[in-house]
Structures are given as C-alpha cells and as structure tokens.
Amino acid sequence: MALSDAEQRVIDGTAWDEFCDALKDAGKIIRSEKAPKDSFNQAEGYRYLARLLRGGLESFLEFRDPLFPQLRCGAHETIKLGADNPDNRYESAPINPAYDYRITGTRGTVNYLGISSIINRYAVDGTMEVTGHIDHRQMDLGPNGEIDIILSKDEKPGNWLPLGESANSITVRQTFQDRENEARAEMKIERIGAKDDRPAPLTAEKLQRGLQGAVMFVHGSAKMFEDWAESFLPTLNDLPPADQDYCQSIGGDPNIFYFHSAWELEDDEVFIIEAPEIPECQTWNFQLDNWWMESLDYRHHTIHVNKHTAHYEPDGSVRVVVSHTNPGVPNWIETAGHKKGTMCWRWIGADKHPTLKSRVAKLSELK
C-alpha cells in the first residue's frame, strides 16, 4: 500500500524539520522593532515562546480530540498569555458542534464561574469568537451545588450552553476573590453517547497536524500580543478603556470591561492609579504584566489586587501604587524586577464602568 503524504513526511523527517524551522522563525517576534532589547526582557521573551510551545503541544497534540474532550488548565503560573488574570483558573476543551456534550460536577464556592463556547482561531488569525455563554447566575444547581449542563446546537431544557455552527472549543473561567478560602468548581466534560468508545491510535496525519497547530499557536499568539503591547505605547503610564469589541474578539469574557496600557518607571518613580468610584460589581481587579503581556510572578510577588484584597479609602475609593520598592502604603503592586511592561484593570459584572485616574510621581513625594 502506498504511503500517504503525511506518512512519508514523518518517515523522512520533513514534518519534524519544518516544525523546528517554524519554531526558530518565531524568535523574530521577540526581536520586533519596538520590543525591549535588553537581556532581561529578551530572556523573558524567549521563555514566553517556550511556554507557548508547551501549551500549544498539549492543546494540539495531546488534548485535541473532540470525540473525547477533557477540561485542561492551559494558562497558569508558568504558561501565561494575553494578560492572564491571576484571580482566574482557565480551562478549555475541544468540541465539535456535530455532537452533543454534557458538563457535570460541583459548583464549589468560587466567586464567579462562566463557560463559553468559542471559535478559537488563535493559531490562524488571533481571534476567539464567543458563540454561547452561561455563568453560575443562570445555572440551576442541585441541592449540594451539583452542575449538569448540556452543550448542543439545538436548545435543550435545563442548563444549556449553545454551540455555534463553527464552534471548536469551550472555555471555563473561574474567578476568585479569596483563593485561599474559596473552593473551585470541579467539572468534567463528555460527549453524549461516548461511554463505550475508545480514542483511535496516533497516526502520521495527527502528528503532523498537531506539530503544525502548536507552532502556529506560538506564532499567532506571540505576534498578536506583541503587536498589542506596541499599540499601548501612545498611552504609556495612562490607563484608558480598551477597545471592548477587540477584547471580545480575542476571547474576552462578555461580563468584563477592560482597561489596558503600558507602563515604565525609573528607580525613584511610582505609578499611582486612583479609582474614585467603585461600581456595584461581581468583582474588580488590577494586575501588572511584562512587555509580552504575561502576568508577573504572582506566586512570589504581590502583582495584583482585587475587590476582596484591596484597602479602601474612607470615601470608598481605591488608590493603587506601583513601585520598585515598598513605599509603605496600602495596595502596593510590586514590579518584580521589571522597569517596563503592560497592565490591565477589569470591572467584572459591573453595572457601570467608571474611568480611572493615573499619574507618575517621585517615590519621595509619595512618602
């Protein structure tokens, strides 16, 4: 029997060689014209590519079968992209709208739980269109917080998540206000009718598609967010509302209003953000990111603040202070060795979206 093209390319090494060449080419993104060229930021950039590759290989090679989906946490403490929220647990799974699925589990006590069906094209053009959404406020739960949701194109009774004609994935966001004391939702997804089925073995075609998808994900994600970071330079050290339509087009949560920009501070400077009005909301938060739009190391540094952890002024307002060293004031955000980067503020489930005030001052003035 004649070999298929994919079989021949795997046997002679072409598929692997092209994967390696394309990965090498992704390094050009880290050396983009406006990207920081110092060794620290460049080192973080190449680590970023390695992290994206790790996530891409898991997504496209290990967890890609929509007949046997599995919820996977693909963005966390050591895989970061797109201003990943330190208050969130992100999960995703592949789906095919030709089939119906069921999500079951328990609600836990996490502050916010939202599930979306999406058209994920991060590896193609950087977009992620939402085709259906349900969150905990719309779910009918069992007496002990049991979750049972049907995912399908056609409407079903009870908890139902619509699947668009071109949907290829679902995303789950769990947003914590108090990670230490809130219990996350525990869920699994299964294709309805798959009980006695088993996945097919790996083939040359699946390997080739997986390698191609992973490296396209590295290219697409790195290029999109590096371009976005460059677009923040005109509002350096200001924090205006972001383009909400664009945020939604690349996978933003429909319940969130975003503020994005870039920051840069000298050793003796601080960046002050004031929120004179805190609206009625599910929650809110602010985080500091590096140039590549990765959240800074929240395992070992205080790089974000939210509705629960913030100190409020007597009038209910909030002041956040970003600086390299501890200024001795509430709501200090550490730069964790960075002198420049990007940042994000979110109003989540808010009844309105007040603007923010920001300015750079000398550390001595603050003290």
Image: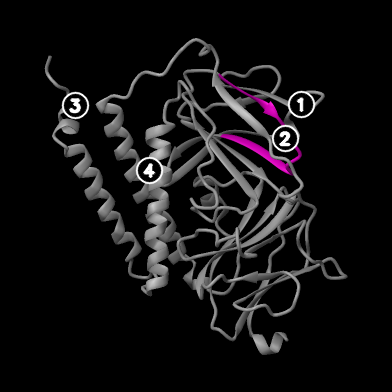
Residue lying at the far front in this picture: please name it.
Answer: 300
Q: Is residue 302 left or right of residue 216?
A: right
Q: Which three-letter amino acid code belongs to the residue tagged 2?
A: His
User: What is the C-alpha distance between the residues marked 1 and 3?
Assistant: 49 Å
Residue behind mark 4? 123
Image location (x, y in percent) of residue 130: 54, 37
Q: Which three-letter amino acid code belongs to the residue tagged 4?
A: Ala
Q: Earlier in the sequence, mark 3 or mark 4?
A: 3
Residue behind mark 2? 136
Cβ–Cβ below 8 Å for labels 2 and 4?
no
Residue behind mark 3? 7
User: What is the C-alpha distance between the residues marked 3 and 4?
Assistant: 23 Å
Point out the image quarter for the N terminus.
Answer: top left
**Of helix, strand and loop, which one carries label 4?**
loop
Q: Quadrant of residue 5?
A: top left
Q: Which three-letter amino acid code belongs to the residue tagged 1?
A: Leu
Q: Residue at x 54, y 18 (%)?
A: 100
Image location (x, y in percent) of residue 231: 45, 65
Q: Earlier in the sequence, mark 1 or mark 2?
A: 2
